[in-house]
Image (cartoon, grey):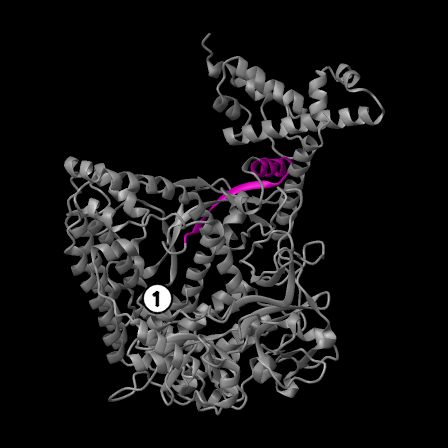
Amino acid sequence: MIIDEDEYKDYLAHYGILRKSGRYAWGSGGEEIHYTEFLSTVDSLKKQGLSETAIAAGLGMNTSELRARKSIAKNEQKQARIDQAWGLKDKGVSTSEIGRIMGIPESTVRTLLVPGEKDKLDRLQSVTNMLKKEVDQKKYLDVGDNTWLHQGVSETTWRNAVALAREEGYTKHYVRVLQLGTGKETTVKVLAGPGVKTSEVRKNQDLIRQVQNFSDDGGRSFFGLLPPLKIDPKRVDVVYKEQGGDKLDGVIYVRQGVKDVSLGDARYAQVRIAVGDGHYMKGMAMYKEDLPKGVDLQFNTNKSDTGNKLDALKPVKRTGEGDVDDANPFGSIVRQIVARESDGQQYLTGYGKNMTDGTEKVISAMNIVHEEGNWSNWSDTLSKQVLSKQSTKLAKTQLDMTYESKEAEFKEIAKLTNPAVRKLLLEKLADDVDSSAVHLKAAALKGQGTHVILPIGSMPPSQVYAPNYLDGTKVVLIRFPHGGTFEIPELTVNNKQPEAKRLLKDARDAIGIHHSVAERLSGADFDGDTVLVIPNDGPVSKRIDTTRALEDLQGFDPRSSYRRYEGMKVMTAREKGLEMGLVSNLITDMTLRGASRSELARAIKHSMVVIDAEKHELNYKQSAIDNGIPALKAKYQGGPNAGASTLISLSNQQLRVPDLKPRRAQDGGPIDKATGKRVFDPASAETFVDSKGKQNVRMRKSVRLAETDDAFTLIKNTPTQIEKVYAEHSNKLKNLANEIRLEQINTPNVVRSPSAAKVYNKEVDSLTAKLRIAERNAPLERQAQIFANAIVRMRQAANPDMDKETLKKVKTQALNQARTRTGAGKDKIVITPDEWNAIQQGAVSNTKLNEILRQSDIDVVRQFATPVNKKIMTSNKVVRAKQMLASGYTRAEVAAKFGISLTTLDTAVNESEA
């Protein structure tokens, strides 16, 4: 019998669901349907020949929702039967009689009475309740593919729990989230509260949170953080502003040798510490020997004494009901120092999820955000915010080095003999060059690195403890954002200073400074703020220009000058971000256009007020009036309400453009064959209808410099010399990227050799097997991107003053951590020398080779394709280096002794100990 599905549309509409809210939302004519009616209706339609797709459409859902709803209905049906069977059994009714009463076989009754059957349904409800509680606390919850892998429940239970939550009025949405590392977007499935619209979720996608609860019993119960140790307030001493606490704001001194406040293997760390039942300390923890008797923690603050030390601390995060948010009481993802009772092992937990066998116990109150070694990656670029405020000569030198390195890499790749490898590396290089043309980062200066700052009370203000640099070296410290050369102190390295050496001996990524130096660093605090350290000794002259501090900033305290008045609307976090962007652009434009020191001081003062306005409830609007910000904007940006006016500030200004797709192959392909430029299909933009019924074009985020072929179009007035340098550099890079793409599309495909395939059949089979394993990593990688975005958001919230260079490192670290947590990246293909030889001989087809290469470790591929002789240390040198380190030499001194970089030294020493 042939069924015309169109004939059943009216029938389906009658039983169909126009509304999906409430416990039983699948009604007929507005009435609710019991689970048995729902299942019988679906079964009836199926018997009449309708496909699952047609049934789902008629019931107002997709096939996945239909399957979930059927599963839920069956569970509800089973739950009712279990309850009835157990109810009868509790009354003493025999199993045979229960079967007769319920109209089912006795064997089915026995199945219903198995405790495990009820347990399955209890688990579903447990997971559902957990999800609802998470949404109630966090508003927007990621419930996309593979999230169940990290909550310890099955995929079926997870999907059914999401569907059941929707049955109870919760809403599901799809939003696009930026992929770290690629700049592309991925779609995330979000569960939100009743009545929430998709437009709201899209607008607040930065608030999408992860499920931090984890179940080690299949969903019966959940836990997130292990309960943190709480320190008795009596053990905490607070040093207030009046006692000098403002000079060390954010520092938490720790008594060494006390187990429950131990930093583990670290000597310093950015931490959160629970104090009492409702407060916590946030800052940088470091050991100190002379703490007052009975005090194990000493917290330094810029607040005044109110008579209650808890007022100086932060209140823990709470749920909407006012309860402590046990999943995230500190508002940051932290790691905990735990001991496993089952085997005695001590370790630091992973980010967000406890790697546990259920016998762990937290042994230290230190909840660690960053620990020693997390800041140790050396910077390999110099941002335009730094370089544009320096001499034109220095900027051009470093930018030219960047261009020349890209051009040299292009020439090297173009010589490769394997077409597929050449194409892949050219594609990646073109993307990298495009990015460089927009972000305008220059080559790093020799020896520069990012370090967290810590206070050393006895350190002279003109000196710095910096064990990564040789004694006597002149270094400059640069914090982001900074107003100009007047906020760049130049200090002399002194690695023999007794107090610093005792506290920070050979620190990998920290420097010790006098507190007055922090005041010059754009008002830096000691709660995890970082600086760029750059050696400033040169054979002829200094590389980085510094000038004396602005006199008008002496003694300026934004918190006392612009206090909140009664009824004042406090700045929000979003407003702070916008205002900081505006004033930062103003300072940049003023600097480039030669503003006077007094004018710059006015803008800097206002920026200092803005940066603290949200946290300390400051009157930033009065600051704008007092400092004449509208007049400065009119003079240097063209009007009292004008914005960025120079290429440096305009280049990364955000804008939204239609989200177009690359031109299709049949229309000429995504790359212009004459110019090498990317080509997009103007008719490919998606449209959608918003909540007001208006049709809109789907847009994507971009920046101004990415949307123009000529950087000079962003220069509004007569260009300054530094603008010319940057515009010419950007245009050169854009042209180079186009040249690379032309080489890419003109590179022929690989021609497979049947004879080579036979000779290397073993290697081909091995590569094919590796490819299949690697392809399983794709969904894990998507999940890792979601987790990484969440980690980055929380770390930005924990350190809102994070500069872009540091943020880049945090993103990389977060992605690595997320990949470790999800298992993503573990199954990348590692090509062996024999397999590479098979590839070179043409044993693998072009299509398969491209798949293999895209799933491979690109660094290994690059090494095979472009072998480079690396400078390494002999075993004897490694032994000698370790002896010198053990004797008290700094890493910088040892590296200088052998004429190698710190990275090479660390790698050699670490490999020898592995």
Q: Which residues are magenta?
A: 157-179
Q: Is residue 502 above or below residue 195?
A: below
Residue 267 shows up from this direction? yes
Q: Is residue 846 above or below residue 789?
A: above
**Residue 219, horizontal then vertical, whole percent:** 63, 42
Q: For residue 885: magenta?
A: no
The kind of secondary structure element at disc 1 is: helix
Q: Please, what is the three-letter code of the amino acid marked with disc 1?
A: Leu
In the foreground, 416 or 305? 416
Residue 509 appears in which quarter of the rendering? bottom left
Q: Is residue 913 left or right of residue 394?
A: right
Q: Is residue 110 above or below residue 614?
A: above
In the foreground, 501 or 270? 501
Residue 641 appears in which quarter of the rendering? bottom left
* Residue at point 48%, 68% (across, down): 579
Q: Is residue 678 left or right of residue 701?
A: left
The residue carrying mark 1 is 650
Residue 32 shows up from this direction? no
Quadrant position of the C terminus in the picture: bottom left
